[in-house]
Image (cartoon, rainbow, N blue to C red):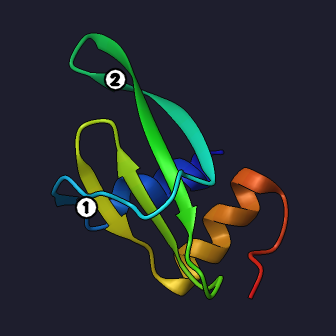
Amino acid sequence: MEKAIDIVKNVNWINKKVEMARYADYHFQFPFKISSENKIASYSLWASQNGENLEMVTDSDNYVKLTKQDSENLYEILIGEKLIK
């Protein structure tokens, strides 16, 4: 799970409120620590129509479209299957 957290932490998030065309395919949460506070970060995840990329939105209005490689890695870690192409 550490690799999944690394992928999510190291992507280039855009602080932007987006509206997706459909409901998220998956929702997941990671715990994280800010100073002395423990928090939970919530994420919504969509697989693109062509099955090559994942898009994520956070509960604090951050958005990212992952690279093909990060999409494949994160999907396999979280879902336990290969990303369908």
- Left or right: residue 10 versus residue 43 is left
Image: 29 above or below 70: above
Residue type marked 1: Trp
Q: Which residue is mark 2?
A: 33
Determine which quarter of the picture holds residue 32: top left
Quadrant of residue 56 in the image? bottom left
Look at 57% across and 41% down and name the residue there: 27
Nearer the N terminus, badge 2 or badge 1?
1
- Residue 23 at x, y percent in the picture: 53, 51
Identify the residue shown where x is 43% and y is 64%.
21
Count residues near mark 1 (Cα–Cα under 10 Å), then give few for <14, some for 14-19, many for 20+.
some
**Which quarter of the rendering shows the C terminus?**
bottom right
Identify the residue under disc 1.
13
Q: Nearer the viewer, residue 48 or 3?
A: 48
Q: Which mark is residue 72?
A: none
Q: CA distance from mark 2 to mark 1?
A: 18 Å
Question: In the depicted view, which residue is nearer to us: 23 or 70?
Answer: 23
Left or right for 35, reference 38: left
- At label 2, the amino acid type is Lys
* x then y, percent, for residue 11: 34, 65
